[in-house]
Image: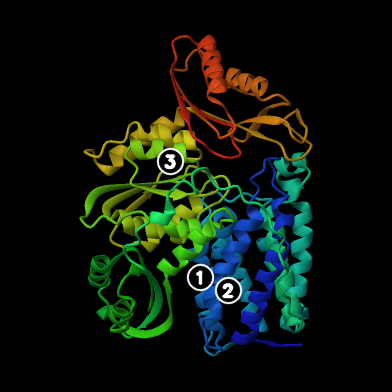
């Protein structure tokens, strides 16, 4: 029974927790409230944890202060989705208390204080905390540990008490959040968090887990990947170079100078400073020079150089076989603007047609993702660096991406980053209609916000399980029409379902309707839908866009 928590043990605990979550993340995904095929809480949380563990495993220090600090930073940069951001903030709160420790290990009392700091920081990360979520689980578990403090003599005792209450709190989440009770599930974020704590407790007890072999799942990537002529891609800057430097003197570090030099040497630059640590990612033909430039300011902590031309050849050879998302991302570079501009607009989109439509409305940088893959905070930092603008507006276009995007505001010094809280592709697209690069930032944000507050959006997808929501009985395989947080329609026939959804979304006050139709919708079906919209209101201005998106047959924006 350990009565102190060393950095080595803490590293084993959080690694074990991450592995336990990864081994069980599909179970967490299935707890999605909406019976739609994009439940990704488990995926987001395990990818967030793995990003933190990757950084921790590169650290040689045995001090719990150093381990928790690097874990916190890795989680922040890798945070995906609301659950991932809240998880990263929990461990940031843990670090904020552990940072006060004078030696390399934490006592039982100090560990308890850190768990309390974790829940407090997690609550601060959310503007309007909702009970019945992961927040309730982390808070009530910590409060129970505080009540039992006198009876807890070891780190294992603390974790066992914490876990027991966390499970009780999770079981109560449907009583606190009616939408969970209606869907017949517990909170997915809380369930994922419990997997982490279970793994941490097992490590404290001496039981280390191994990653289970994942079943091969066929991933449906967006249409057009094989048609990008990637055999002919000219990779201008061939080495993906990453390193972390511990600064000798923070006051002597000239972030802008290093950024400008690296920009002149390559592209895809990400440069983030957090106290005395600086993390750099750049694509360049001179990796040794880039690393030496960083080393001028301090001691190298980690470094990695990969030859992307060799990786590219491997991807080309694999055409006709399985393609992984990571390879696709590496080839989908977006050029860095060398000259600083007044505005840069970043949008999160999925579907080649939707991406093209956003680009045509002036978006400078598209981050691939949204409904089926929430991008990490690091992707937003990279995008802000790439657009090289004084003012940057980010359109998350998904409620589960907003928190990750908002982390960028404090990470990108020297750039005025603002996040417009667009919760759907429809809102993002409509907001761009009133964006004007000649106007002041606040004026643009005001007019864009006004547009999204006065419009309706809806989507048509399919159900992945039987359930009942808001009085609508849903059967597995039905086409379901969603407006905001409500499922309005569930029918076995797609045409009937989209007609009913449109009838519930369009009224006599509607003026403009934009419809993005998906991969599985033919041009003839799209024409039929357009004709039906005209029957609903002959004065409507209608725009039909072949979005080529997966999962969502129709995405609708009504102004």
Please, what secondary structure does the residue beneath circle 2 have? Answer: helix
Direction from residue 150 to residue 438 in the image, left or right: left
The tag on residue 53 is 2
Q: Percent x, y for residue 300?
A: 39, 84
Name the residue beneath numbered marker 3: 355
Query: Which label lies toward us, 1 or 3?
Result: 3
Q: Residue at x 55, y 74 (%)?
A: 54
The answer, for residue 530, to whether it is visible in the render is yes
Q: Percent x, y for residue 553?
A: 59, 32
Q: Percent x, y for residue 405?
A: 45, 53
Please, what secondary structure does the residue beneath circle 3 have? Answer: helix
Q: Earlier in the sequence, mark 3 or mark 2?
A: 2
Direction from residue 365 to residue 10 in the image, left or right: right
Name the residue beneath numbered marker 1: 74
Q: Which of marks 1 and 3 is nearer the N terminus?
A: 1
Near mark 3 (Cα within 10 A), the count class, few <14, some 14-19 or many ≥20, is many
Please, what secondary structure does the residue beneath circle 1 have? Answer: helix
The front one of 380 and 161 is 380
Q: Within the image, what quadrant is residue 465 found in?
A: top right
Q: Earlier in the sequence, mark 2 or mark 1?
A: 2
Q: In this view, does 466 lie above or below 515?
A: below
Direction from residue 342 to residue 170 in the image, left or right: right
Q: In this view, does 447 lie above or below 369?
A: above
Give the CA separation, mark 3 to mark 2: 33 Å
Coloring basis for residues: rainbow
Q: Do the residues labelled 2 and 1 touch (CB within 8 Å)?
A: yes
Q: Residue at x 23, y 66 (%)?
A: 264
The answer, for residue 147, to whether it is visible in the render is no
């Amino acid at each position: 029974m350990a009565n102190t928590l060393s950095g080595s043990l803490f590293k084993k605990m959080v690694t074990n927790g991450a592995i336990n979550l990864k081994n069980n993340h599909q179970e967490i995904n299935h707890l999605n409230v909406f019976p739609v095929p994009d439940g990704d809480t488990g995926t987001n949380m395990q990818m967030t944890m793995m990003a933190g563990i990757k950084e921790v495993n590169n650290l040689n220090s045995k001090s719990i202060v150093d381990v928790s600090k690097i874990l916190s930073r890795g989680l922040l940069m890798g945070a995906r989705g609301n659950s991932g951001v809240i998880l990263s903030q929990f461990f940031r709160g843990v670090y904020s208390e552990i940072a006060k420790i004078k030696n390399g290990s934490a006592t039982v009392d100090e560990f308890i204080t850190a768990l309390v700091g974790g829940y407090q920081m997690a609550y601060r990360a959310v503007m309007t905390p909702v009970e019945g979520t992961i927040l309730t689980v982390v808070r009530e578990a910590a409060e129970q540990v505080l009540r039992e403090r006198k009876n807890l003599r070891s780190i294992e005792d603390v974790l066992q008490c914490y876990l027991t209450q966390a499970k009780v709190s999770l079981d109560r989440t449907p009583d606190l959040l009616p939408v969970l009770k209606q869907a017949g599930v517990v909170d997915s974020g809380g369930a994922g968090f419990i997997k982490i704590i279970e793994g941490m407790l097992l490590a404290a007890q001496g039981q280390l887990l191994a990653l289970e072999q994942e079943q091969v799942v066929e991933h449906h990537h967006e249409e057009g990947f094989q048609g990008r002529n990637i055999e002919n891609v000219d990779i201008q800057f061939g080495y993906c170079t990453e390193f972390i430097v511990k600064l000798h003197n923070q006051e002597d570090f000239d972030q802008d100078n290093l950024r400008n030099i690296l920009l002149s040497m390559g592209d895809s630059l990400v440069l983030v400073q957090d106290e005395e640590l600086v993390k750099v990612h750049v694509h360049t033909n001179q990796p040794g020079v880039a690393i030496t430039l960083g080393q001028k300011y301090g001691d190298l902590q980690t470094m990695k150089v990969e030859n992307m031309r060799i990786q590219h050849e491997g991807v080309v050879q694999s055409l006709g076989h399985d393609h992984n998302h990571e390879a696709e991302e590496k080839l989908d570079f977006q050029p860095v603007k060398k000259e600083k501009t007044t505005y840069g607009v970043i949008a999160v989109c999925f579907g080649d047609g939707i991406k093209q439509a956003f680009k045509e409305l002036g978006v400078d940088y598209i981050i691939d993702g949204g409904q089926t893959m929430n991008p990490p905070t690091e992707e937003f930092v990279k995008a802000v660096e790439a657009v090289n603008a004084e003012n940057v507006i980010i359109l998350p276009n998904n409620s589960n991406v907003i928190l990750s995007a908002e982390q960028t505001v404090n990470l990108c010094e020297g750039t005025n980053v603002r996040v417009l809280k667009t919760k759907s592709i429809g809102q993002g697209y409509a907001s761009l209609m009133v964006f004007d690069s000649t106007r002041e930032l606040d004026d643009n944000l005001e007019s864009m916000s006004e547009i999204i507050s006065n419009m309706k959006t809806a989507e048509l997808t399919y159900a992945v399980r039987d359930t009942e929501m808001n009085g609508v009985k849903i059967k597995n395989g039905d086409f379901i029409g969603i407006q905001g947080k409500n499922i309005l329609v569930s029918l076995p026939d797609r045409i009937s379902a989209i007609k009913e959804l449109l009838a519930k979304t369009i009224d006599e006050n509607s003026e403009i309707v934009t419809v993005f139709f998906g991969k599985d919708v033919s041009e003839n079906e799209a024409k039929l839908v357009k004709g039906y919209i005209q029957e609903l209101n002959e004065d409507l201005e209608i725009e039909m866009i072949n979005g080529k998106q997966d999962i969502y047959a129709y995405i609708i924006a009504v102004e």
